[in-house]
Image: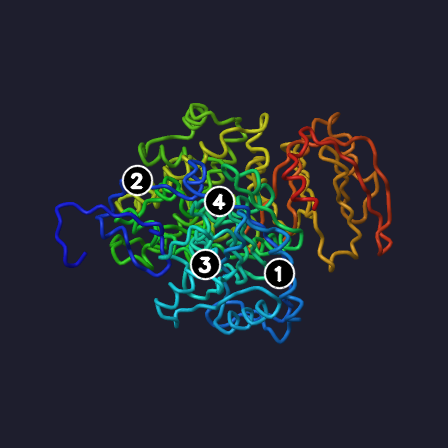
Amino acid sequence: MNKLKPKFWLGMSASPDRNDGFDIYSLFDHNIASEIRLQQALEEDYLAPFHYFGLSDLSIESNEKENKTGNLQAKFDQIEFEQRINHIMEQAKYYGHSGTNGVKGLIFVSSKDEAKRLSEGFNRKGWKTLPLSGDDSQQKREEAIDRLVSDDRSDRLDYLITVDIFNEGVDIPEINQVIMLRPTQSAIVFIQQLGRGLRKAKGKEFVVVLDFIGNYESNYLIPVALSGDSSYNKDNMRRFIQEGANSLPGMSSVHFDEVARSRIYAAVDQAKTNTISLLKEAYAQLKYKLGRIPDLVDYDRFESIDPNLFFNNKSLGSYPAFLMKYEKEFTSRLSELELEYLKFLSVKFGAGKWIDELIIIQALINDGGLVIDQWKDLLIKNDILVTEHTIQVLKSSLSGNYAAGTGAEKMKRIQFVEEETGRISFQFQKMLENRAFKQSLTNLFKFSLNRNKRNYSERYKETKFKLYSKYTYEEVCRLLEWDRPVVAQNVGGYWIDHKTKTYPVFINYDKKEAEEHLQYHDRFLNRYTIRAMSKNGRTHESKDMQTALNAKDQEYSMHLFIRKNKDDAISKEFYYLGEIFASGWYEDQKNVNGKNITEIEYDLEVPVPEELYDYITN
């Protein structure tokens, strides 16, 4: 390309998204004539379907260590090597391959030493394999490929074992089995390796992919890669693990054995998907594609990383904070206070779970003379449920008074309106004179309002919740319109707000061993019945238990929020499962410390969907 000077360039790449920092898009002035991703190519029958099997590896994970580059490498001196060889060979034979001319496979491993040792082990037990790495000449590689695809050479091979080659730039349509014996450290590389087997060939109906999964921190990248979902949304990852076989187009399928599945779930829970390195990589990929600094809405438009991960990174809090730190072309400057305002709005409302505050602030920006008497009509126009109490809570939120605990004092700095009059605050009005700040607000509001319309517009009954969406303790307090949020530690499984007559119940379904002394037995009996425990020191005659048992008669609404465990490294959210009603069954018990405790049975108004039920209970 440096020598030729044509009037028009037309290029094609199977791997435009790269993790080596090279911008392919710039070679073509960021003009994308057409783009087709793996899922669409499978749907259009351009590729051979694949059958992916996530299998548990036989390594001793407790002694795996992470080196300085973040790569987890199994220590072979901790592994029964022969047992592992047998396990791999048995699984490869069991799951088989397409075609009648024998296996023609690629095996991806982490190191040259591993490739050599595995090859020796496989060859000793009857396979014909050859290790290849970047140290080998092009001539040796081509000769090895010919031996692999040949049906009649006496020295034909069953497998090539590769380390740092064959991820891209090689075309071997005959490949009918791919074995992965390395941790998934990059979704891009995973797809490149999977793609080695997706070319169609005569006599080949599909490719079998065997992924031997150890206890790696990076396992969360497996659902990211297979689903094609680059948002790094953990719920999407979990959903794919649960429903993988149903979510791929065409004849392709995904299966996990139980050990591998549990390892991936654990990795998803522990994954820190909002690290600066991951955010910078996703940002760079989208910027390469666009040829400019991406706006927040571009991330959704091009199905990139979820911008809320920028917001939830504690060192950032907002997208402009990221740009100011890491993008040289972003020349706008924002004050510390302006960044605090943007952080507040991004963290609280960026996901678009509710938009009441955004509607009012947007109106204040357009009309600084907006008064509180106009709020109700404005909200109703935007299809928002409004009462007089709604307005009071909203005024409290916008004047910096809706907070609890250690953050309450800090929130008083964030005032959009005056507490008494509801008019735009002098401080906020002054800040709007900064065009960069005002533009940042506009970009955030556009993104958040789009998210709300897309993800949260279908509300459950007369509530502000969407069934099966996730909410934090504080968000539940706000959406139930309590005067103040309650500190999570004080909630203790449930809380009654007598002013709004609401009674949310929060359940951590899986308990840690350290909590077993509590003898909690919160559990589903089926998809529409759950039993939950009271706080300690309660009997069925206690006030909170009587309210639960007689909620219908007393006109209290009880709502169920549940999460599988507390393990998520980023999010402390609960799935909303709708209203619940005491069935009438209860039992007073004693805990291990001899204190009173009551178990109550509740009926769910809406049965839990099977996939979510299986995820929570299994």
Q: Residue at x 79, y 30 (%)?
A: 583
Q: CA distance from mark 4 to mark 2?
A: 30 Å
Q: Residue at x 53, y 63 (%)?
A: 182
Whichever of labels 4 and 2 marks the residue nearer the N terminus, that label is 2
Residue 187 versus residue 525 in the image, above or below: below
Q: Tell me the kind of residue under disc 3.
A: Thr
Q: In the rendered structure, are the residues bearing label 4 and label 2 in contact, judged by CB atoms less than 8 Å apart?
A: no
- Expressed as whole percent of the image width and height from the top left, the position of residue 179 reads 53, 57
Q: In the rendered structure, are the residues bearing label 4 and label 3 in contact, judged by CB atoms less than 8 Å apart?
A: no
Viewer-side label of 1, 4: 4
Q: Which mark is residue 275?
A: 3
Viewer-side label of 1, 3: 1
Q: Residue at x 75, y 43 (%)?
A: 523
Q: Which mark is residue 89?
A: 1
Whichever of labels 2 and 1 marks the residue nearer the N terminus, that label is 2
Q: Is residue 515 visible?
A: yes
Q: In the rendered structure, are the residues bearing label 2 and label 1 in contact, judged by CB atoms less than 8 Å apart?
A: no
Q: CA distance from mark 1 to mark 4?
A: 23 Å
Whichever of labels 1 and 3 marks the residue nearer the N terminus, that label is 1
Residue that label 2 marks: 34
Whichever of labels 4 and 3 marks the residue nearer the N terminus, that label is 4
Structural crowding at the residue carrying mark 3, measured as other residues with C-alpha within 10 Å and reported as few (<14), some (14–19) or many (≥20): some
